[in-house]
Image (tube, rainbow, N blue to C red):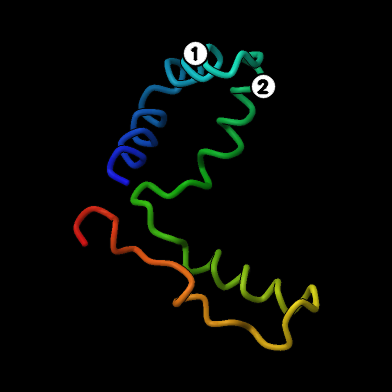
């Protein structure tokens, strides 16, 4: 987890370098990588923790999609024990 968190921090602090690395590794066009970077990176938390609001929306979606009759308790479905400082 620490490596993931450090990688996200690096990508945020070194956008052009991160895009160049991703372009080389994936063999995708730099414009595509830049779009993915701009679209997806803001959604990734800086500390690896799950967003409470995102979990609330996700749990409600199960009811909205008629997959469940009631909103599930999401807490037993994930752990933060492997995050730094825990």
Q: Residues within 10 Å of mark 2 (few under 14, many from 20)?
A: few
| Residue 69, x across and y down, in percent | 73, 88
- Which residue is drawn at the image coordinates 46% and 16% (left, top)? 21
Give residue 50's quadrant in the image.
Answer: bottom left
Q: Is residue 43 left or right of residue 71?
A: left
| Residue 83 disc label | none
| Residue 74, x across and y down, in percent | 51, 75
Q: Earlier in the sequence, mark 1 or mark 2?
A: 1
Q: What is the tally of numbered marks visible in this picture?
A: 2
- Residues 85 and 40: in front is 85
Q: Which structural element holds mark 1?
A: helix
- Which residue is drawn at the image coordinates 38% and 52% (left, top)? 48
Relative to 75, does residue 12 appear above or below in the rendering? Answer: above
Residue ID for mark 2: 32
Relative to 16, does residue 36 appear above or below in the rendering? Answer: below
Q: Is residue 68 left or right of residue 84?
A: right
Relative to 10, does residue 66 appear above or below in the rendering? Answer: below
Q: Is residue 67 left or right of residue 17?
A: right
| Residue 12, x across and y down, in percent | 40, 31
Picture quarter with the C terminus: bottom left
Relative to 52, does residue 48 appear above or below in the rendering? Answer: above
Q: CA distance from mark 1 to mark 2?
A: 11 Å
- Which residue is drawn at the image coordinates 44% and 67% (left, top)? 78
Residue ID for mark 1: 20
Residue at the outermost bottom position: 70
């Amino acid at each position: 987890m620490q490596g993931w968190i450090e990688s996200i921090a690096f990508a945020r602090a070194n956008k052009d370098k991160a895009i160049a690395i991703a372009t080389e590794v994936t063999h995708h066009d730099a414009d595509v990588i830049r779009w993915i970077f701009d679209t997806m990176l803001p959604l990734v938390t800086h500390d690896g923790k799950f967003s409470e609001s995102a979990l609330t929306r996700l749990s409600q979606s199960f009811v909205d999609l008629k997959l469940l009759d009631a909103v599930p308790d999401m807490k037993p479905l994930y752990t933060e024990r492997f995050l730094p400082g825990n």
